[in-house]
Amino acid sequence: MIDISLTVNGERVSACVLPRTHLVDFLREELCLTGAHLGCEHGVCGACTVRLDGEIVRGCLVLAVQADGSVVETVEGLSDSGEIADLQQAFIDRNALQCGFCTPGMLIASQDLLKAGGVPSREEIREHLSGNYCRCTGYHAIVDAVEATAKAREAAR
């Protein structure tokens, strides 16, 4: 067992973990933050997407011990802070939620794109989200939601 200490959604967390524990498993099982999902467990589907020190990563490819001393943000933290409230509402308004399995990863990846500001093209949105699979083929509605949020944010500037 290895002692780790990290900040998760603004809260300092310390734990003792097995060296082989993946970050997403630690978040789900130890901290009960179940927004990041286990999908392919190979870093391909994007269901386990979280922010690690400001960069989006696949939680199934990062070991919890690698996150020692880092700042981790999950969809729960982004939601609670209000950072993605408009994006979440756009997903609701455009029926981009479908079954919801991919939604947390899609939201984090979408917010990562939108942080840059401006209004990305639909092709840029698709490219940025290409590492996040939607099993319900809801891509069109997801792209609509991201585009609408970008336009609304730009108009509010």
Image (tube, rainbow, N blue to C red):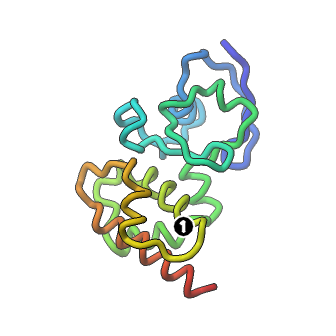
At label 1, the amino acid type is: Leu
User: Extreme left residue here?
Assistant: 137
Identify the residue at horizontal 63%, vertical 85% (top origin): 157
Looking at the image, residue 50 sits to the left or right of residue 103; the answer is right
Across and down, in percent, residue 77 comes to 61, 53
Query: What residue lies at 38% left-to-right and 38% top-to-bottom?
Result: 44
Q: Tell me which corner region of the image, top left, top right, bottom left or bottom right, holds residue 83.
A: bottom right
- Residue 113 spot, x, y in % from top left: 52, 62
Q: Toward the viewer: 152 or 11? A: 152
Crowding around mark 1 (Cα neighbors within 10 Å: few <14, some 14 to 19, many 20+) is some
Between residues 129 and 87, which one lies in front from this camera angle?
A: 129
Picture coordinates of residue 74, whole percent (x, y): 57, 48
Residue of label 1:
114
Q: Toward which corner of the image does residue 137 lie, by quadrant?
A: bottom left
Identify the element where label 1 is drawn. Answer: helix
Query: As rendered, which of 120 and 144 lies closer to the eye?
Result: 120
Q: Residue at x 36, y 61 (%)?
A: 126
Residue at (66% x, 50% y) in the render: 54
Number of residue marks: 1
* Image position of 129 with respect to 84: above or below: above
The N terminus: image quadrant: top right
The location of residue 115, given as percent across then percent down, is 60, 65
Horizontal placement of 130 versus 109: left or right? Answer: left
Q: Quadrant of residue 117?
A: bottom right
Task: Name the residue furthest bottom.
Answer: 155
